[in-house]
Image (spheres, grey):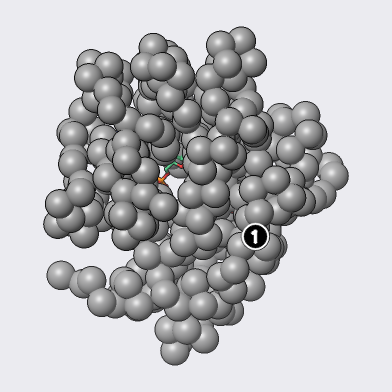
Amino acid sequence: MALKKYVIVTGAAGFIGSHLCDRLLADGHKVVGVDCFTDYYDRRIKEANLAPAIANHRFQFVEADLLAANLAPLLDGAGLIYHIAGQPGVRGSWGHQFDLYTRNNILATQRVLEAALACGRLPVVYAASSSAYGNLSTMPLHEDMAPAPVSPYGVTKLAAEHLCRLYAEVHDLPTIALRLFTVYGPRQRPDMAFQRFLTAQRRDQEITIYGDGTQTRDFTYVGDVVRAFLLAGAASQVRSSAGMVFNVAGGSRVTVNDVLAQIGHITGHRPHVRYLPAQPGDVRDTWADTVRAEAVLGFSASMPLADGLAEQWRHIVGNEV
Ligand code: NAD
Ligand code: UGA
């Protein structure tokens, strides 16, 4: 049932945020999307992500930086915040870029939480990251394991996740953090593996693999991620699970080399691959224990990897300019 109050989506022009907006609008909600179009990748890609939502009369877009905007009037009349905005990308988070990660992941989240508190304890569902875990020796990764991120990005995502828990515990703010595991599908960011691999295939270019390709990921289709957000954001859920962290993963853990084989099949020709050294900050493996999300949120992923990859390929082929 659509909420009378509107729903806020931060990071609305990004990969995950734009899909969430589309689904909320399709379900009849009124949505306010906020994004400042960071220059991490081409603004035109983000504008294209937003286009379906912009065409809907129940959508309002606010171009604003969460660190600069006056959030109080923006949140007035809202019933829920999906806080998706952030500075993503594991491998680029070293060196001087760390400033951006601190700003858009930690400081922006703290500002959103303060504003949510001041606005009558508005519930917040946060896009946390599997990168919080790092290279733990036990698999699958369970939410109660002690996190030990191996990238500066992971450190900032974990810090923001802790802020969400802290505001729930100390200030009674209803927050939930979803640790998303490598999300893929149409509109995937241009720096991410599948988008790079499929685009290279389309242009008959070489694909670069970091490491020997035996690293694994529990890849998660964006439609499944959106469903997890909706379940977590349900009014009774976000209050009864306040302060909790959930793994949200696809249940199709594979090696990067397995993905290449599937890409060859989907695109109809074998990829030309070059292997480079593994990148600092990349975890070796991810594999989620999803029992908590199943038991508490009623979430389980449904998109098989081969079908999701084919969807992403069709989107790339169908949106060439
Ligand atoms: P994305 O870069 O496509 O989207 C993020 C959006 O946030 C961008 O459009 C950017 O302009 C906006 N933004 C950043 N800082 C902002 C600020 N200060 N004010 C307003 N807008 C701001 O990235 P994505 O892949 O869609 O990821 C979305 C979120 O999910 C991020 O927080 C990321 O850390 C998290 N996450 C992503 C994945 C994944 O696999 N894509 C996995 C785990 C967690
Ligand atoms: C992804 C997102 O980029 C992060 O924002 C997110 O927080 C993280 O998932 C998460 O799960 O929390 P990553 O797993 O590195 O990070 O996702 P991809 O960029 O799709 O990379 C997957 C694997 O492919 C990695 O091992 C990477 O090294 C490899 N890769 C990537 C290549 O071999 N070549 C490339 O050109 C790109």
Specify whether 210 is left or right of 253.
Answer: left
Q: Residue at x 70, y 53 (%)?
A: 294
How many numbered marks appear? 1
Specify the quadrant that holds the C terminus.
bottom left
Task: Looking at the picture, tell me which residue is in the foreground, 291 or 263.
Answer: 291
Image coordinates for residue 119, horizontal then vertical, percent: 36, 17
As rendered, which of 282 and 183 lies closer to the eye? 183
Residue 186 to residue 36: above or below: below
Locate residue 45 relative to residue 152 in the image: left or right: left
Q: Secondary structure at mark 1?
A: loop
Q: Quadrant of residue 313?
A: bottom left
x and y percentages locating residue 59 in the rendered image:
21, 47
Q: Is residue 41 visible?
A: no
Question: In this picture, is 234 found above or below 22?
Answer: above
Q: Is residue 60 above or below residue 273?
A: above
Residue appearing at x 38%, y 32% in the figure? 79
Q: Which residue is mark 1?
A: 300
Frontmost residue, 91 versus 180: 180
Q: Is mark 1 within 8 Å of ligand 2?
A: no
Give the residue furthest to the right.
Answer: 138
Q: Residue at x 36, y 49 (%)?
A: 2
Q: Is residue 142 visible?
A: yes
Q: Give the amino acid type for the residue marked by disc 1 in the picture.
A: Ser
Q: Position of residue 23 (x, y in %)?
A: 36, 57
Report whether 221 appears left or right of 267. right
